[in-house]
Amino acid sequence: MRYLTAGESHGPELTTIIEGLPAGLNVDVSRINDDLRRRQGGHGRGRRMQIETDTVEVTAGIRHGKTLGSPVCLRVVNDDWKHWTKIMGIESLEPFDESEVKRQISRPRPGHADLVGGIKYGHRDLRNVLERSSARETTVRVAAGAVAKILLKELGIEVIGHVKEIGGIQANAVDVSNMQPDEVKKAIKENPVYCLDEEASKEMVELIDETKKNGDSIGGIVEVVVTGCPPGVGSYVHYDRKIDGKLAMAMMSINAFKGVEFGIGFDMAHLPGSQVHDEIKWDQEKGYTRSTNRLGGIEGGMTTGMPIVIKGVMKPIPTLYKPLQSVDIETKENFKASIERSDSCAVPAASVVAEHVIAWEIASAILAEFPASRIDQLRQHVQGQRDFAKEF
């Protein structure tokens, strides 16, 4: 299973084509739109999210609510496009007249793709870089991940993302895997920063407001928990089939993410092996389990059947309303960097993106492990693996 996205931040639309979904999967578009609304929410978001109302349109691959087995095409229209038709138009401007191209950018923002992207592709107008490198692209990644979550739910697999920390304010530890998924999702959705600690979330909101007043930005840590995944997904025989490698890549592919860990992660560096590895147990009802889950549900590049726990670190967004020092690529003079619309804190929204990119990788790995052209076949294969593992 794979997908490809296309589109610019202020272009006409964002599009994704999904290939490899089994036929017969019930796809409720309202569930995709609900996840798109969550991505737009969270305290600290900027004015762009007040302009856009992201809803998905299905243009191929689904008939009467069910997948056909052919590629599925999803598109999200950019409402703000009407104000950018001349700036971002596709029509040729030959002979080229600079006065016709408004809002050109020659002052790269530190921390963004602007300068290096301009160097790589030879763009003198750095808008050509920032329009595609914008986190706006994650809109259709969330749409694709929402379809993956629908598939996983059919297999008894749940994926939940939430905020663990913002700007140094840490939420109390919560074992999401021991809670009812629907209750957890409801609590996260109703919280302004998508956090499960009410007291910590109040402090986070206050810090975000203060940061915004100062023209600055803050980052944080998000956690994604996957429950119900059968053991043996992934592989130890090739580096590029290790499930933790795929999940780490997915997490790090999110804009502004700079770190990833599984289970207790970097704390392992400070502990002896006896306090890191998870002892194995077996009983008649559950089969093989672990007495702890410090490794985050993965051993040797494969799922163990325990909840998968993965955390990602998001840096503060580099577009600041008190811009940092930069250099104009035309004059080579020092300037304050360009200011684009941005968020003071996008960690809550990033937790939604993380949830969906992880869901995609899990679904993709499941389909690689259990090839199936139909959803009923896939259910049988996955349940068969669970039964086999239990009696192994």
Image: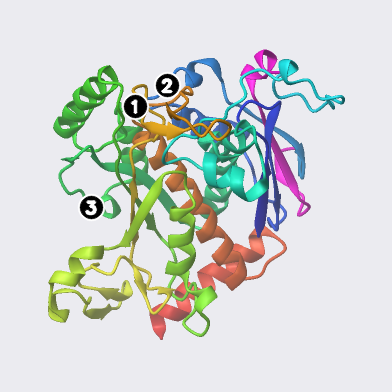
The image shows residue 392, relative to residue 41, as above or below, that is below
User: Where are the magenta residues, as a range?
Assistant: 64-85
- Per the model, the C-alpha gap separating discs 3 and 2 is 31 Å
Identify the residue position indicated by label 1 in the image.
344
Question: Callout 3: few (<14), some (14-19), or many (20+) C-alpha neighbours within 10 Å?
Answer: few
Residue situated in front as seen by the camera: 43 or 228 = 43
Identify the residue position indicated by label 2 in the image.
46
Looking at the rendered image, the disc whose residue lies closer to the viewer, 3 or 1, is: 1
> Helix, strand or loop at disc 2?
loop
- Who comes first in sequence, dot 3 or dot 1? 3
The image shows residue 282, relative to residue 256, as above or below, that is below
Q: Which amino acid does label 1 sit on?
A: Ser
Q: In this view, does 296 lie to the left or right of 332?
A: left
Q: Which amino acid does label 3 sit on?
A: Asp
- Residue 206 in which image quadrant: top left
Q: What residue type is labelled 2?
A: Gly
- Who comes first in sequence, dot 3 or dot 2? 2
Q: Which residue does the image show at 44% across and 54% down from the upper left?
A: 252
Q: In this view, does 294 lie to the left or right of 182?
A: left
Residue 161 visible here: yes
Residue 25 location, x and y as percent? 66, 50
Residue 328 location, x and y as percent? 51, 31
Identify the residue position indicated by label 3 in the image.
175
